[in-house]
Image (cartoon, grey):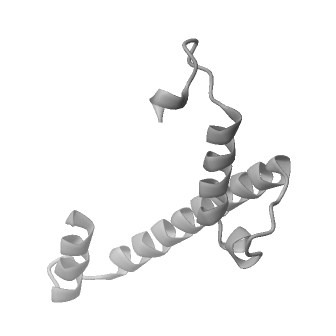
Amino acid sequence: MSSRRSSRGSISEEEINELISKLQSLLPNARRRGSSQASTTKLLKETCNYIKSLHREVDDLSDRLSDLMSTMDHNSPGAEIIRSILRS
């Protein structure tokens, strides 16, 4: 990729388009639209919203796991399974 950059290190329009396309392919809603190109601004907003939703989901799952672990016997087989999954 660096071979396509100018000597000053700027990113070419082709590289930007490639990165936008890759980013679009990572977003669930953008993939459903198929090949239609969203504006860069809209795509970046969607990306930020998606990242925020992933953070909320992680926080929610963390809270649920904490609640579950607080109600379990720490020596039970279920607690050991959860600990082994978390170590992976």
Q: Percent position (x, y) of residue 81?
A: 20, 81
Q: Nearer the viewer, residue 4 or 57?
A: 4
User: Above or below — where is 76 with respect to 64?
Assistant: below
Image quadrant where residue 83 sits: bottom left
Q: Nearer the viewer, residue 55 or 10?
A: 10
Q: Residue at x 21, y 64 (%)?
A: 87
Q: Residue at x 53, y 30 (%)?
A: 4
Horizontal side, residue 6 vs residue 13: left or right: left
Q: Percent position (x, y) of residue 22?
A: 59, 56
Q: Nearer the viewer, residue 44 or 40?
A: 40
Horizontal side, residue 60 vs residue 50: left or right: left
Q: Percent position (x, y) of residue 55?
A: 58, 58
Q: Residue furthest bottom?
A: 77
Q: Residue at x 72, y 78 (%)?
A: 32
Q: Percent position (x, y) of residue 51?
A: 63, 56
Q: Residue at x 54, y 13 (%)?
A: 7
Horizontal side, residue 75 vs residue 39: left or right: left
User: Above or below — where is 2 with respect to 26?
Assistant: above
Image quadrant where residue 82 sits: bottom left
User: Above or below — where is 49 with respect to 57?
Assistant: above
Image quadrant where residue 28 sits: bottom right
Q: Nearer the viewer, residue 74 or 21?
A: 21
Q: Quadrant of the C terminus?
A: bottom left
